[in-house]
Amino acid sequence: MGTPETGTPEKSSAPQPIRAGEHAVGYAVTLPVPAEKVWALVSNPHRHHELDGSGTVRDRAVGPHVLSEGARFSVHMRKFGLPYRLPLKVTRARAPEAGTGTGGVVEWRQPTGHRWRWEMQPINDGEATVVTETYDATGQNPLARAVLSAVKVPAENARNIRASLERLQQLMAPQ
């Protein structure tokens, strides 16, 4: 995943689109903080409303405060004025390991089969982190994927991912 030319995010203050696959969209941004700080936020579903760029995630979640592989959680949402709750299952979770260069990842699957993934790769001796968020519909039910593509959900998700990474930049900015 990364820019079409290099596979890595460009050095820029704005989130950059990445190549994520035929049925996936994603953006990456470099933040001047350790990966562990980013992990503390994105691995806690009770804080997802703080970084949500779509405006749909509410401040109520049910489940653990640190996601682990196999964990189940749900978040309360609101779209088009209608409240709903999404039951989710964590498919990958690994915290970054300070001082080792080992990055972190957390990914969950939604009921229709698509996945949301956050990756945190330490750079500059762990003083900064490349953060990537991806929406991947590869494993989604083909009919659901076709319907959601027809109503431009992947394009909307790309805009929302960019907005989420911009919010994350603000949350992680040095004070």
Image: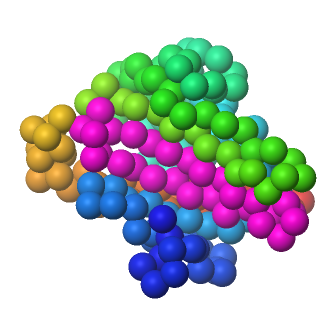
Dominant SS in magenta: strand
Residue reaching furthest to the bottom: 5
Whether residue 170 appears in this view of the structure is no
Seen in the picture, residue 110 relative to 119 is either above or below; the reply is above
In the image, taking residue 81 as reference, residue 75 lies left or right, namely right
Is 130 or 69 nearer to us in this picture?
Answer: 69
Where on the picture, by quarter, is residue 48?
Answer: top right
Q: In the rendered view of the protein, which quadrant contains the C terminus?
A: bottom right
x and y percentages locating residue 152 in the rendered image: 20, 56
Q: Position of residue 116 (x, y in %)?
A: 45, 42
Indicate the quadrant where residue 113 lies.
top left
Percent across and percent down for residue 158 are: 38, 60
Range of magenta residues:
113-140
Residue in the picture at 50% in, 45% down:
117
Q: Is residue 155 above or below residue 51?
A: below
Residue at image location 66% in from the left, 30% down from the top? 44
Residue 160 appears anywhere in the view: yes
At x 59%, y 80%, the residue is: 10
Q: Is residue 22 above or below residue 99?
A: below
Counting from the top left corner in percent of width and height, residue 92 is at: 54, 34
Q: Residue at x 28, y 47 (%)?
A: 138
Colour scheme of the picture: rainbow
> Relative to 103, is 23 on the left or the right?
left
168 or 18: nearer the viewer: 18
